Image (cartoon, rainbow, N blue to C red):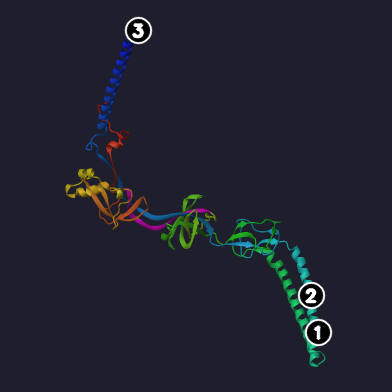
Amino acid sequence: MIDYLWDMELKKRTFMVKKILKKKKLLLIGLLIICAVIGFCSFGSEDDSENQLVFTQISKGDLSNLVSCTGTLEAVSSVDVGSELSGTINAIFADYNDDVEKGQILAILDTSQLVVNLRSAKAEKLKAEAEFRLNQLNYNSSKELYKKNVISESELLESETSYKTAYASLISAETNYETIEMDIKKYSIIRSPIKGKVIARSIEAGQTVAASLEAPTLFTIAEDLIKMEIYAFVDESDIGQIKEGMKATFTVETYPDETFEGVVRQVRLQPVTVSNVVTYTVVVTTSNESGLLLPGMTATIDFVIEEVNDAFLVSNSALNYQPNRELLSKYMDKSKRPSKRAEGKNEQRKPQRMDVNSDGTSVLWYMDDDEKLQPLKVTTGISDGSKTEIYGSDKLKEGLKVISSSKSKSSSSNGGSLRRPGLF
């Protein structure tokens, strides 16, 4: 009896579960149908979604085609001042940023040891002079005796050798004396070789200078900071466009609102490779009358490849734009509508790059006074990547609105969906 009751309860519960699942299934199907209806009403048919045109204006102005890079400012001419003598710096008479004249004393070496060496060299010189005079008298006397057959030829030759040896010793002693004297009077005093400004100083008073291997650099003097140069590093893909005499503009970080001008003086042919990137050095000269530019500053340079003034300009997006079949059907005169084959081409055209024909022409689209879509054929000039110069049509005028893009109204409202009233 218990088993029978248990079986009846189990069958009852199984029936209830199946009933609940059936209701859920019907509810799910109903929800799917409602979503489909909402989606249909939200997006609508192609006829319900109108195209919304986005316009841009033709403007007039100046335009430049530029090549940009970075570089370093340097003085046009700078000289490293060193010392040919080793010794201790006794005094310094020039510091950073000092203006110096040619021949002006910059520093003096301690000459105490040189003075001692000079006295010793003077003594050697006097000794050599005395020996030379003695040997000279002996040689002159030997020549007279040889003429009288008093001495032999070998004795005469010996006297002549002693005379010439004494003369050589005298020259060596005089040279040594003059060298030490020159070191004291000339090389122990460090002078500026040019007129300019001290931009570097690498010594202090009391410092020892060792010039045995190479002349150490004590000062660096820029000849003229009124004129400066930029060593610009141009990528190999752009170097073919850079020519001598080309104009350039540049800025430096410390004066971001100031724009300076320069001219290309030299394009160096030696490549420089850093991390597999090949660049070429371009030397740009510039004026520094204001004194704002300093050696070592980093400059951001724009080389002016091409430029136009007071030209008609249009956004590249307008040159890329091509109306689709729906717009052509809605806005264009029937007599001016393209064939279906042409329409197909327009729909497949990709606007990733500026749409310019091989002859340099392109087509802009605008709305005339009768709200008809009209093409405007123009010739394109230089471009800066954002705007392009246009010319070649008498219909061009400043302020003319041309189409740059189009989008459906349904995608521009309510976050991309257009709800129809009465659904909720």
Residue 274 placement (x, y as % from top left): 50, 55
Q: Is residue 300 magenta?
A: yes
Mark 2 / mark 3, whichever is N-terminal = 3
The residue shown at (27%, 25%) is: 29
Work out how far the residue at label 1 is from the one at label 3, CA to CA, in angstroms: 162 Å
Which of the image's four quarters has the C terminus?
top left
Magenta segment range? 297-317
Q: Nearer the viewer, mark 1 or mark 3?
A: 3
Residue 422 placement (x, y as % from top left): 24, 26
Q: Residue furthest bottom?
A: 148
Q: Type of residue at label 2?
A: Leu
Work out how far the residue at label 2 is from the one at label 3, CA to CA, in angstroms: 149 Å
Q: Is 20 rendered above or below residue 347?
A: above
* Tag 1 residue: 138
Which of the image's four quarters has the N terminus?
top left
Q: Nearer the viewer, mark 2 or mark 3?
A: 3
Q: Is residue 126 magenta?
A: no
The residue shown at (26%, 40%) is: 51
Q: Nearer the viewer, residue 288 or 280?
A: 280
Q: Is 247 rendered above or below residue 154?
A: above
How dense is the environment of label 3, judged by Cα within 10 Å: few (below 14), some, or many (20 and up)?
few
Label the magenta part by its dominant secondary structure.
Answer: strand
* Tag 2 residue: 126
Q: Type of residue at label 3?
A: Ile
The residue shown at (36%, 57%) is: 308
